[in-house]
Image (spheres, helix red, strand yellow):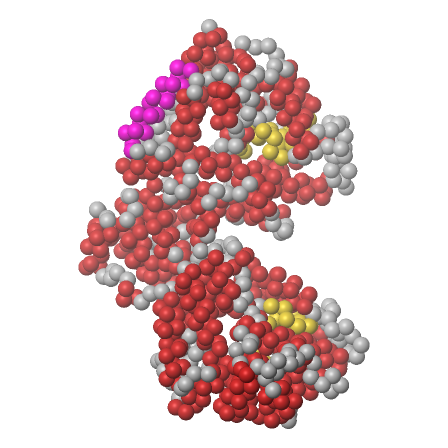
Amino acid sequence: MKNTAYDQDVADAAVRARRYSPFLALLLDREPALAADFAAGVLPALSALVSGEPDAPAPQRLRLARRRLALRVAIGDLAGRDNLTTVTHALSDFADHALDTAIRTAIAERTPGAEPRGFTAIALGKQGSRELNYSSDIDPILLFDPATLPCRPREAPEDAAVRIARRVVEILQARDGDGYVLRVDLRLRPSPEVTPIALSVDAAISYYESLALPWERAAFIRARAAAGDVALGESFLAAVAPFVWRRALDFGAIGEIRGISRRIRDHYLQGQAFGPGFDLKRGRGGIREVEFFTQIHQLIHGGRDPALRVPDTRNALAALSAAGWVDPQEAAALRAAYTLYRTIEHRVQMIEDRQTHTLPSGAALDAVAQLHGVADGAALLDLLRPHVVATARSYDALDPDEGDALSFDADHLAGQLAAAGFDATEVAAQRIAQWRGGAYPALRSAAARAALEAVLPGLIAALGSSPDPQGAIVRLDRMLARLSSAVNFFRLIEARPALGRLLGLILSHAETLAEDLARRPELFDGLIDATALDPVGDVGALAAEMTSRADYQAQLDYVRRVVGEKRFALGTQIIAGAADPLDVSAGYARVAEAAIWVLAEATIAEFAAAHGRVPDSELIILALGRMGGGALTHASDLDLIYLFTGDYGAESDGRKPLGAVLYYNRLAQRISAALSVPTASGPLYEIDTRLRPSGTQGPLCVSLDGFARYQRESAWTWEHMALARGRPVYGSAEARRAVAAVIDAVLRGDRPTRDIIAEATAMRAEMAVHKPPVGPLDAKLLPGGLVDLEFAVHMVQLENGQGLDPNLRVAIAALIAAGKAPPELAGAYDLLARLLVTLRLVAPDAHVPGVATQDLIARALGMADWPTVVASLDAIRQDVSRWLALVEGIAA
């Protein structure tokens, strides 16, 4: 439908097109009806031009449609009535339509009546992101499914696919008096020098999962199933998505993309200097550098944030800015530059319908400028210049010149170490010399040594600025000694300098985390995401993140990887001072609960495949101790009890049936193994089941009825004290409520009459003999420490039936509110718990650490300095000891 109102800008655009563009002048002559519309100031709707001549053969119909669309898009663009998004979307959508029509036509010609299935086109580059140029080729990958592709009798699917692909290219590229449809470049397919022009989907997936080069990952940021069997194309893209968007990023890919940019600059030297002859696409500060800048950030962060997986460049910059990865002003400047570059690029291509990106010189440059609507070539260059300078600056900041780095000649290394903050410079210099000499296997390859040299300036600065530079470099040395490869680790530090400073803190303070890094250096990759220093999610969200669709063994590995990342990130939060240790402790417990849930579900499903399920019955997992209280440390084991509901005399319904008792005991063994046995991804948790009924002498899993009977009739006082922190962490809501009801009844008095305080006092005295404090800061076992506090709380809970919450912090608050505990115990628990969680990371031997770590502990506890910590600990231990003596004295 036409807009009948006269538009002077449309009429003026048609005049400029005829005057300055031979190609557009030719189209105006070939399309007199459109030319008349433009002269009358009328701009027809884009949708009215795509169909071409409905009765003409498909190739001719497409050529006519392309000619009319090219003219209409140009006039709408020049008149300022269509913005860049409208223009590129119109060109891209036509390319999709043409490609789809060509595929359907090629299949119909060979196998009339066959459904156009089993053949798809994956659009890459600017077609994939709907940013196609005015005069551009398309870069599809043509794929087929041998099982569904229409074939002629006795024809191999591979041969049919190649013949279809050749016909598609012919339909699109062949020229006649009406022009052509599209130029097609198939060289982005896997190994184009040796592979056919159409590949099977399985072969393509295999290639991208195992052999693809880093630049191919970047290409797939803009991949889209554009034509043919779109469902087939989308399933292919879903299969290769992990290849593109990796959680643990190989920063070699980033280096490769930068290398591509450098090689482009070197190859197109004549297009680097800004001015006439400047290459808008490949020139320094041009289109490619905006695109590469964007894609580098997407590759770094998109594996963890799906919101950044945006194909078109300008919207991707907006997403990166919104997520905080790119400065908003810088993102806005790059978007503005990209819009202008692409607009002028279109003007250059409109002149002769050539796929060029180079600004001409002389009168030809003036023609481009005047086609755009500015006075001359000089004015056009003035318009472009500030954008080119700003873009080049942004891109160069990703890869600073080597001359900006410190010099590491041996003669100057000691002085540079001293300037960075090292005291024992000779020792540090000697270690660095050993690294350079390939002292460890991880440092012996040329790639490792190159990565070391690239990262060394920033690494020395980061370690030197840490609280304990000498301790940090010693721990880094231990870590490098255990790595199998150091290349990716160094590249990560190089790419994200802020992580180097965080590494210095970890190595200065937390040998536990440093050991984790030595075993799994990819843990550090997790810190590229700013959310790593935020609280972990709830149990449901964590369980969803840990759940994999892979087989059982792969699920075990996957949970270990995710748990390792979460625990490492939580520990780092304490080191970085980003979180309260009490919140971190709760986070450790939520991570563990999610792992229990996911692995229990997976193990039950695996077990049921052979043995079925016991009708009207289910497994319940009860957590005790710190896990039951929802407050773990980095090194906590898990105290678990396995229970089952239903008739203990029942039998499972699988092909290998088992009685209920045997069924659940074997299942419990499998779940314990799933939670504890090291796999290729390392260990997970130590599982302690000694708190089950009858201890190690009893079965691993008992019925809920048997558990309730044992607790009501036979359990000892220490078992009831342990039950005070009992919390069901796996099972249906109904089953967990049933267990909680049993626990509540026992704790409120449905149990044997015993002298609780006398028995607990005797047990605490025996424990003090056999488990003395390991050091002067043992917040758990010192007199007046956490164990004493826990004993007192549990004695009061059992004596009074009050404060019955597995979370000790909540229980203490309830006892204080009921007048059963002094108010100062709330602060006592908080300090002791914070100290325990922090010391498990920075001083696991519970001895007084160095001055720098003392400051970290004080900060974690919210105190001014180390003397304040020591004084507060002494005062709180006295408070706890007084209350424990008071509780014990009640019995006396």
Query: In the image, is residue 874 part of the stretch drawn in magenta?
Result: yes
Q: Residue furthest top?
A: 892
State the residue in front, 818 or 256: 818
Q: How many marks?
A: 0
Query: In the image, is residue 367 part of the stretch drawn in magenta?
Result: no
State the residue in front, 410 or 20: 20
| Residue 223 in picture, x, y percent from top left | 57, 68
Q: Quadrant of residue 696?
A: top right
Q: Residue furthest right?
A: 113
The structure residue drawn at horizontal position 45% and vertical position 75%, both measured from the top left corner, is 340
| Residue 382 in picture, x, y percent from top left | 37, 79
Instruction: Name above or below for residue 306 compared with residue 10.
Output: above
The structure residue drawn at horizontal position 39% and vertical position 35%, both measured from the top left corner, is 838
Q: Residue furthest front?
A: 5
Q: Is residue 221 visible?
A: no
State the residue in front, 194 or 72: 72
Q: Quadrant of residue 112?
A: bottom right
Instruction: Name above or below for residue 754 compared with residue 845.
Output: above
Instruction: Name above or below for residue 868 compared with residue 288.
Output: above
Give left or right: position of 549 versus 111: left
In this picture, which residue range is highlighted in magenta? 865-883
Q: Is residue 297 visible?
A: yes
Give left or right: position of 251 versus 27: left
